[in-house]
Amino acid sequence: MVGQGGFGVVYEAWDAALERVVAIKEYMPSSLAFRHADGSVAPQSEGKSDTFQLGMRSFINEARLLAQFDHPSLLKVYRFWEDKGTAYMVMPLYRGRTLREKLASMSESPGQAWLTSLVDGVSQALQVMHGANCYHRDIAPDNIMLLEGTDLPVVLDFGAARRVITDQNQAVTVILKPGYAPVEQYGDVPDMAQGAWTDVYALAAVLHLAVSGKVPPPSIGRLLSDTYVPLAGQESLRGRFSEPFLRAIDAGLAVRPEQRPQTMLEFRRTLGLEGTDSQGRPTNPTTPRSAPSTSTGSTSNKPVLSGSTTQRPGKSATAWLGAVGVGLLLVGGSAWWLLRPTSPTNSAAAPATEATAPAPTGRVTALPGTAEPAPEPAAPAPRDAIQSLAALRHGATPGFEVTASSAKSRMQIGADRLEFQVSSNRPGHVYAFLLSSDGHMYLLFPNSIDKRNTIRPGTSLTLPRASWPLDAGGPVGTDRFAVLVSEREREFTSVGIQSDGLFPQFPLPVLAALEATRSSEATPLLGEPVCPKDSKCTDAFGVAFFEVEQY
């Protein structure tokens, strides 16, 4: 055994038939499986069996995918098979270090010639993949290996790569790397389809790190407020890199997918490679060949499919940002206060309890003989919408006491009306959040009709106002409310709030992405206090929670 991680084990082995040293990678997810005394692998429990089998099909699909290609910068798979309850793949025993380790060892950023040679090999490899309608979707410095003696780049870790078939739709969860993942990877909507331009962004982000020493700002934040500083405009870089080279990187990092080079060949041309390899010869990437025959064991599993499509991306971000019709219908002075579902939200946890997500497990590659990559700063634990709502309590001012309760904890759909009372021991502005049972997050108050609510100590505020009651409109399930009383008015533009309906809506993909890059326990859902112009101010608030079950 020469390597072990959270999802597999790598062994150094001897191929007796061809008399060569190889690496064997075994599917062994430590969080899902255990090993019997005879070496066979089995799921830890019946409840984990489906996840284990799905992961193994993905592992076999990755091996089948790589076995089709023959390019010096693509990980090569000789054989793959299933045995002992799990799966294996055989590949060359690569020795070297990752691009992340290489850059960390350099006293200054590498020169343009070295980077051009690097990106030449990587972009050719990706171009071969794209020709087979397959996208890597996880290009990053720790997924590019530089081989010993030659620095030839080899693209690693195809766990996120999936064959794209437009008439199928099976969601695939991918752990995103902020800074390298383009915006279309944060949400699966037709307006933001993934394609060759997705890998273009990630590869440009790798070059940005190599040139400037910094990872680009996360794409999801850039969509809301773009803080990206173009490399071509930085005087400190112009002495070492040509302006066309820097402009090419900037072009690859365009936030909107349609504004980037649409193919890897187009990106190569903007970089000045113009279809030649690193030795100046015409590029003729090896076309995919038939997968070699495998040894005994079933390999008939169908590929794990992605929901992505090959259509070119659209030109409007509105659909991705949650501009789904809010579906609120004002009838006879009352409103149905729950809406059509978009994506289901886990309703098992109460907002008063915030679950702790397990720490990400490690990754093993078939590249023994190298040091472990330098650890990246720990990413904040992921949160779902329920946990985001519960996290409103983080940062609340000690002694700022708020209570909120509904007149009815259970309401009959079409018969009952929402009514809740708020009290506070300090004056402030009232904000009410609703996470509906069908997976939408709203700012219930203030809204486009009731624009401002304040409260005084010792008094009780009843919402909604009697002049326009909110009828229980379904669907069946639990609706979670948080009421925040803030010393100052608040604004929520930094959370991407959408105000094109009666009730402003927080798009959950945006909220989840901001949660993934937050720097404190406080949730981005808090927004920001409105301070006097050109001055800072204290942020004092209290929060309370309640639930309503509709039946």
Image (spheres, rainbow, N blue to C red):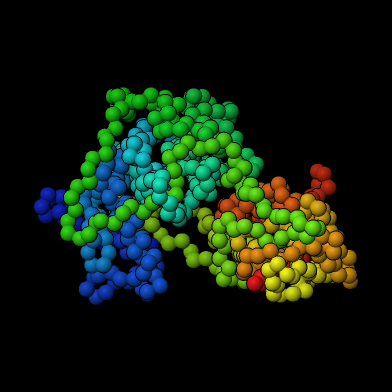
- The relative height of residue 9 versus residue 186 in the rendered view (above or below) is below
Q: Is residue 392 visible?
A: no
- Vertical relation: 296 (above or below) 247: below
Of the 4 image quadrants, the one containing the N terminus is bottom left
Q: Position of residue 390 (x, y in %)?
A: 65, 66
Placement of the C terminus among the 4 image quadrants = bottom right
Q: Residue at x 28, y 29 (%)?
A: 284
Front position in the image: 119 or 149: 119
Looking at the rendered structure, the number of numbered marks drawn on it comes to 0
The vertical placement of 521 against 349, above or below, is above
Q: Position of residue 242 (x, y in %)?
A: 48, 24
In the rendered structure, the answer to whether residue 547 lies left or right of residue 205 reads right
Residue 386 placement: quadrant:
bottom right
Which residue ends up furthest to the front in the rendered image? 332
Residue at image coords 51%, 24% = 243
Residue 213 or residue 41, whichever sits in front: 41
